[in-house]
Image (cartoon, rainbow, N blue to C red):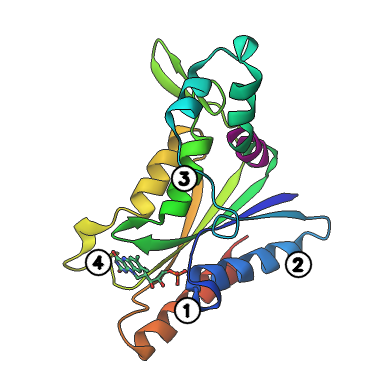
Amino acid sequence: MKILHIDSSPTGDHSYSRRISAKLVEKLKSENANATIIHRDLVAQSLPHLDPFTIGALYAPAEGRSDAQTAALANSDQAVKELMDADTVVIGSPMHNFGISSQLKSWIDHIVRAGATFHYTAEGPKGLVPPGKKVYIVAARGGVYSEGPYKAYEHQDSYLKAVLGFIGLTDITIIPVEGVSMGLEAAEKAVSQAEAAIAQAA
Ligand SMILES: Cc1cc2nc3c(=O)[nH]c(=O)nc-3n(C[C@H](O)[C@H](O)[C@H](O)COP(=O)(O)O)c2cc1C
């Protein structure tokens, strides 16, 4: 079993998504003696924003790419390979301004790639990620979005489900850690609920 563990919170040791996603990976590892783990820390090693040259390289036919274009795609190639190789993907995601962190968005921009992870057909776009991969998203956020007045502001889980589903990753379990900025009691409750969800994760 190959686990791809992605962290995208810039809050280091204070990060809930890092702490809880690490616990989940530990659990998966304890249940799979042969598990191998690739840890991609998108803060320690941030991916560059796509620039005009890299976008040109993305659209250039593979056989006609220059050496410079091939080099420009190295980050994307590596990120796509890690995703394609993985059986299970664990994503630690902090909510930033109602969506995901810019670090995680940059990873998405490198892995959602025409001709590599999706393609266009006469019936519309189709995902190219082989079926059978399991995705867990540990979604940490200061407020509460699963219910209440801010429900419509939730663009973290819904966005990740949409964009990952677009490339073929449809077996997604969200582990929310929400309300962590709403006082100590709320934060402790959020963590214990997330830990209970991890205990149930297969
Ligand atoms: C730049 C930034 C933007 C944030 N935006 C939101 C937000 O829109 N909604 C919210 O509920 N919490 C927001 N928060 C709080 C974080 O979601 C919260 O601290 C959460 O624990 C982040 O995950 P982490 O602990 O893994 O870093 C924001 C925090 C930062 C640093």
User: Measured along the vertical axis of the image, is residue 79 above or below residue 189?
Assistant: above
The residue that label 2 is drawn on is: 30
Answer yes or no: disc 3 within 8 Å of ligand 1: no
- The type of residue carrying mark 1 is Val
Q: Residue furthest bottom?
A: 185
The residue that label 1 is drawn on is: 191
Q: Residue 79 magenta-drawn?
A: yes
The residue that label 3 is drawn on is: 106
- The type of residue carrying mark 4 is Glu
Q: Residues within 10 Å of mark 1 (few under 14, many from 20)?
A: many
Q: Residue furthest left?
A: 149
Q: x%, y% of residue 107?
A: 51, 45
Q: First in sequence, mark 1 or 2: give its number.
A: 2
Residue 8's tag is: none
Q: Nearer the viewer, mark 3 or mark 4?
A: 3
Residue 147's tag is: 4
- The type of residue carrying mark 2 is Ser
Q: SS class of the residue under badge 2?
A: helix
Q: Nearer the viewer, mark 1 or mark 4?
A: 1
Answer yes or no: disc 2 within 8 Å of ligand 1: no
For the residues labelled 3 and 4, the Cα–Cα distance comes to 28 Å
> Residues at badges 3 and 4 in contact (C-beta under 8 Å)?
no
Residue shown at the point (22%, 58%) measured from the top left:
153
Residue shown at the point (33%, 79%) measured from the top left:
181
The answer to which of 63 and 131 lies nearer the viewer is 63
Residue shown at the point (61%, 42%) measured from the top left:
133
Q: Is residue 26 left or right of residue 98?
A: right
